[in-house]
């Protein structure tokens, strides 16, 4: 019998510089922390609830540096979101581009974790 997945519990990104990552996710992206856990001095886990999903960032584990995973944010306007991120030094890693179902652009956090901005088409 296969595993029964009910929902995505959380997505976790490992980061090397927690203050820099927090500034990116809280100031540039605009997320509000919903849980902060300090395992030991200088080592923490921070969660951000986004709809029914949670993003966690932590410096408790080393980043893989290999990519592969991508967290995608639904936004009202991909191009406007890219313009709002520009003052924070955020650059695009791909796009913006149109597909049959969406407009999409890639960005990265300060540790190179892949993020995307997504707008579903009607």
Image (spheres, grey):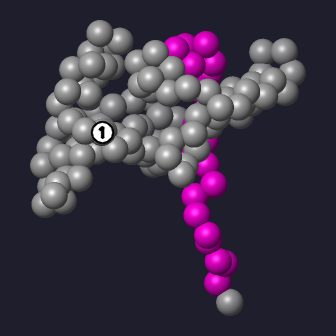
Q: Is residue 62 visible?
A: no
Residue 84 occupies quadrant: top left
Q: Nearer the viewer, residue 34 or 69?
A: 34
Q: What residue is rendered at 44% in x and 23% in y?
A: 30
Residue 82 falls left or right of residue 30: left
Is residue 11 on the magenta stretch? Answer: yes
Q: Position of residue 50 (x, y in %)?
A: 51, 41
Residue 72 falls left or right of residue 35: left
Quadrant where the C terminus sits is: bottom left
Which residue corresponds to mark 1?
Answer: 75
Q: What residue is rendered at 25% in x and 39% in y?
A: 76
Q: Position of residue 105 (x, y in %)?
A: 24, 38
Q: What residue is rendered at 58% in x and 58% in y?
A: 8
Q: Position of residue 25 (x, y in %)?
A: 49, 24
Q: Nearer the viewer, residue 23 or 121?
A: 121
Q: What residue is rendered at 14% in x and 44% in y?
A: 97
Kind of element beneath mark 1: loop
């Amino acid at each position: 019998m296969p595993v029964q997945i009910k929902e995505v519990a959380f997505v976790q990104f490992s980061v090397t510089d927690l203050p820099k990552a927090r500034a990116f996710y809280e100031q540039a992206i605009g997320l509000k922390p919903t849980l902060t856990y300090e395992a030991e001095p200088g080592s923490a886990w921070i969660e951000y609830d986004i709809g029914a999903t949670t993003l966690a960032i932590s410096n408790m584990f080393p980043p893989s540096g290999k990519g592969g995973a991508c967290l995608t944010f639904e936004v009202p306007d991909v191009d406007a979101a890219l313009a709002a991120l520009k003052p924070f030094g955020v650059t695009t890693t791909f796009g913006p581009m149109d597909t049959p179902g969406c407009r999409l652009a890639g960005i990265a956090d300060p540790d190179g974790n892949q993020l995307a901005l997504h707008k579903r088409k009607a």
